[in-house]
Image (cartoon, rainbow, N blue to C red):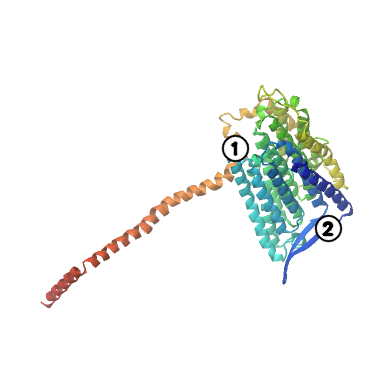
């Protein structure tokens, strides 16, 4: 009997092959298909569902389906002891369909359906293990993404000015209109929340509370890339000022996450921070105006990052759910195939020739070097690339070399089952997809004209990052940063510039604290004294006087009569 994992694996793999072959056909013929279906037609108002099929949407859809098929195949063994495996797989399938709806939609309403679907299903997946850590991470993920949802809703409201929500018809025509500029600002804000740019970065490492197959899917090709893909679709409408702000924020995100990964010891969080760094790289090259190159790096990154998470899941699975890299070491002796895949993905992340990451990342750096930019952007860009290589080699040193540090009794061993086969299905594309996509997407290659020293700058930065990563791991240089003098600095750098504190306590603590203080001063203080309590006391006193008058009215009448008679007698004298 076929399991639910194998059914969806076969379905997604077949759809992926069909989608990729269609994308090549569309690309060669420069063919675009727009399908419109009228959902409601009432008098002069109509709601139309639009589907956009071009080479970009089809190739991205094929990558999402292919990675999803391998992750579901991998999950059958990884989640084999789980009681709710069917529910888990159905949640993953809903996640994939939400992403596909987002990919093929040129209409803001249908984009919002896919966008909200991603947010809601990701919340269900992050809290899957149902503990306090998962609940906190799920709430942070959901609420951070709701900011982008609100921005997308506001952009839908402003698009009513154009009479249609199909933005592809208006991007070039209304480029300099202030309404379109405001819509673009809202779209950039929505993309920044979904792709975890500063100041919305803290939810991405927190989402590691989800099962590892979810991390492999969410942080490679689906949730975090939705923001980048949305900006690629809106590429013609952005102004230079908005792009400059996006360039600054994305470069700082890349730098911040690279620093944080060098101080982190949680295996999944290191890979999540590397995802954040690569998202900053995609956003940076997108802000420079090269949207196809950003899409190229998005595709290559999706493959090697998905496999990197799957390898990390196998390591964690073998170590009994231990994620601390300090307990690892010498794993290459026990898990040779997994460590081989892990190393290839790490080298692809660093951009070593001639893996898939090299073709996109090296091209990104060289195109950036040809731009007329501030020296600050150049420095942040190159330092961030060096930090990427640095934490990758630090991770390799801690996990794969030296002696095993976890336990003297361990049952480590390579499983020849579904997990290894699922990883093996991706490794070929991690190696060859870069050159294949470059031949397909850039039939006319980029003309790179750089001086020799600037051309060698990338190689120099990569070699420096390798050496520094080895030094940090070998001589425990990050432990010296834990000294009393540098403890505050290392804590600041290792916690993503206090971004989790700002996103949680920073938003909640001060309003709650000030509300409590104002409540004591005003609501329970002066306003209570001069308002409720004083009014009640005066009413009570007045009602007492009226009660006294009511009970003794004959005596009071007689006394008043005597007083008035005495007064009149005195006045008549």
- Residue 208 is situated, as x and y percent measured from the top left of the image, at 66, 40
Residue holding disc 1: 492
Q: Is residue 92 visible?
A: yes
- Residue 284 is situated, as x and y percent measured from the top left of the image, at 73, 46
Residue holding disc 2: 33
The image quadrant that residue 387 belongs to is: top right
- Residue 264 is situated, as x and y percent measured from the top left of the image, at 65, 34
- Left or right: residue 195 versus residue 347 is left
Q: Earlier in the sequence, mark 1 or mark 2?
A: 2
Q: Residues within 10 Å of mark 2 (few under 14, many from 20)?
A: few
Tell which tag, 1 or 2, sits nearer the viewer: 2
- Left or right: residue 323 versus residue 33 is left
As drawn, the residue found furthest toward the right would be 29
Q: Nearer the viewer, residue 506 or 52?
A: 52
**SS category of the residue bearing label 1:** helix
Q: How many marks?
A: 2
């Amino acid at each position: 009997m076929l399991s639910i994992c194998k059914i969806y694996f076969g379905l997604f793999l077949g759809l992926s092959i069909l989608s990729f072959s269609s994308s090549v056909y569309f690309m060669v013929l420069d063919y675009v298909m727009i399908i419109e279906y009228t959902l409601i037609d009432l008098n002069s108002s109509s709601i139309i569902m639009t589907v956009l099929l071009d080479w970009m949407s089809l190739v991205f859809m094929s990558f999402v389906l292919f990675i999803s098929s391998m992750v579901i195949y991998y999950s059958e063994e990884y989640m084999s002891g789980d009681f709710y495996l069917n529910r888990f797989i159905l949640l993953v399938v809903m996640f994939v369909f939400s992403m596909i709806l987002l990919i093929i939609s040129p209409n803001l309403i249908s984009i919002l359906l896919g966008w909200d679907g991603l947010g809601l299903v990701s919340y269900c997946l992050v809290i899957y293990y149902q503990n306090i850590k998962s609940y906190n991470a799920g709430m942070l993920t959901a609420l951070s993404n709701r900011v982008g949802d609100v921005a997308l809703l506001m952009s839908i409201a402003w698009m009513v000015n154009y009479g249609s929500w199909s933005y592809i018809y208006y991007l070039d025509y209304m480029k300099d209109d202030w309404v379109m500029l405001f819509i673009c600002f809202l779209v950039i804000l929505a993309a920044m929340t979904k792709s975890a740019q500063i100041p919305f970065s803290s939810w991405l490492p927190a989402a590691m509370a989800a099962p590892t197959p979810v991390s492999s899917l969410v942080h490679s090709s689906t949730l975090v890339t939705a923001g980048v893909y949305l900006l690629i679709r809106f590429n013609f409408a952005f102004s230079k000022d908005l792009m400059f702000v996006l360039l600054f924020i994305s470069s700082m995100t890349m730098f911040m996450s690279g620093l944080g990964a060098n101080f982190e010891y949680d295996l999944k969080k290191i890979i999540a921070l590397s995802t954040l760094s690569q998202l900053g790289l995609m956003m940076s090259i997108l802000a420079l105006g090269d949207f196809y190159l950003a899409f190229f790096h998005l595709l290559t990154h999706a493959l090697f990052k998905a496999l990197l998470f799957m390898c990390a899941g196998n390591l964690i699975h073998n170590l009994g759910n231990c994620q601390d890299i300090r307990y690892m070491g010498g794993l290459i002796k026990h898990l040779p195939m997994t460590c081989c895949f892990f190393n290839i993905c790490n080298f692809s992340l660093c951009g070593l020739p001639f893996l898939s990451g090299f073709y996109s990342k090296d091209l990104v750096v060289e195109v950036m070097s040809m731009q007329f930019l501030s020296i600050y952007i150049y420095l942040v860009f190159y330092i961030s690339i060096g930090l990427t290589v640095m934490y990758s080699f630090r991770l390799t040193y801690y996990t794969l070399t030296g002696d095993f540090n976890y336990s003297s009794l361990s049952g480590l061993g390579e499983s020849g089952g579904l997990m290894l086969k699922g990883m093996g299905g991706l490794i070929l594309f991690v190696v060859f997809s870069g050159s294949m996509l470059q031949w397909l997407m850039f039939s006319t290659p980029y003309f790179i004209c750089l001086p020799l020293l600037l051309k060698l700058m990338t190689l120099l930065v990569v070699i420096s990052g390798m050496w520094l990563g080895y030094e940090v791991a070998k001589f425990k240089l990050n432990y010296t940063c834990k000294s009393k003098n540098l403890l505050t600095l290392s804590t600041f750098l290792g916690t993503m510039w206090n971004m989790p504190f700002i996103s949680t306590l920073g938003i909640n603590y001060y309003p709650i604290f000030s509300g409590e203080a104002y409540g004591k001063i005003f609501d329970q203080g002066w306003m209570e004294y001069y308002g409720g309590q004083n009014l009640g006391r005066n009413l009570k006193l007045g009602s007492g006087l009226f009660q006294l008058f009511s009970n003794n009215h004959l005596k009071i009448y007689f006394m008043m009569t005597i007083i008035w008679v005495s007064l009149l007698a005195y006045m008549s004298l």
